[in-house]
Image (cartoon, rainbow, N blue to C red):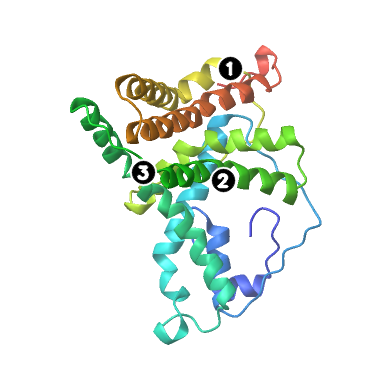
Amino acid sequence: MGTMSVIRRDALERAGGWAEWCLTEDSELAIRLHALGYRSVYLREPLGWGLIPDTFDGYRKQRFRWTYGPIQELRQHWRKWLPARLGGTPTLTSAQRIHHANHGLDVAMIGIRLLSWPLVLAAAASMITHHEHVAVPFDLWVAATALLVSGVLIRWLQYCRVTGASLKGALGAIVAYQALGHTIAIASLAAVLDRPARWHRTDKFQIARRRRRALVTTRSESLIAAAMILAAGILVASTHGGLTTMLAIGLAAQGVSYACTPAVALIAEHDLRPRSPQHVRE
């Protein structure tokens, strides 16, 4: 469901209306509609167009909602997705159970994985301090490389093969998605820990170009990117291969991913059309 969805009024009323407590009220409604036995239909033919945020900050706030909301849905409705014999909703099909469950579990795991990073950094610091060398089997190198490459490859296939995007467009989409990594992780962790979050309207009205805004709103990601790349360099310089080299590669990859954030923010500001002084909105 979403901006271009059409919902029958009687179905909406029967389901209990919109859930004002959920940041993704449209997809949450889909769960209750499907639980009542309704079916949804996806049309590949575009029947309308929506507006996207002009600035990266607006883009980020939008993605925060889209990450936080599915975990709210998971907390509220997970019992419906159990098999019927275990108390699940019998009117849901197996495909609906899987898709609705995955919608929340997929983003919830991002926040849970974020909790492992302090352990990774502590292990790296310990190995440097004690001059430890842990050999890595060749099989593990192959598995780690496949894991690192497959994520980018899958997204490239998604954009090029499924949506028909050009190579340039697919690369741009991949960079734009990587730029949201920190926002997605923070939103996921906040939802997993049940931290309160407000619904922020996405500003879709044209505003003036300000490159300084891009640097200010992404300073956290810029600092994290620099710290990770610096830490990766220290690991490579201080050790002699093995597990620490693998950790260094992981840190460098994460650092590059974080560096996409200020880059995309600057590109977004650059593409804004200059406004005359009387139309500049503070």
Question: Position of 174 compared to 45: left or right?
Answer: left
Q: Residues within 10 Å of mark 2 (few under 14, many from 20)?
A: few
- The quadrant in which the N terminus is found is bottom right
Q: Residue at x 49, y 66 (%)?
A: 101
Q: Outermost residue toward the bottom?
A: 85
- The reply, left or right, for residue 266 in relation to residue 77 is right
Question: Along the polypeptide, which appears first: circle 3 or circle 1?
Answer: 3
Spot occupied by residue 132 in the image (x, y as percentages of width and height): 23, 31
Name the secondary structure under disc 1: loop
Q: Earlier in the sequence, mark 2 or mark 1?
A: 2
Where does label 3 land, which residue? 114
Residue for badge 1: 210
Please give the name of the residue rendered at 53% of the width and 31% of the height, measured from the top-left corner: 57
Residue located 43% across and 25% down the image: 225
The answer to whether residue 198 shows anywhere in this view is no
Q: Amino acid at mark 1?
A: Arg
C-alpha gap between disc 3 and disc 2: 20 Å
x, y percent for residue 82: 44, 77
Q: Position of residue 274 (x, y in %)?
A: 70, 16
Residue at the limit of the structure toward the top, as seen here: 277
Q: Are marks 3 and 2 in contact (CB under 8 Å)?
A: no
The residue that mark 2 highlights is 150
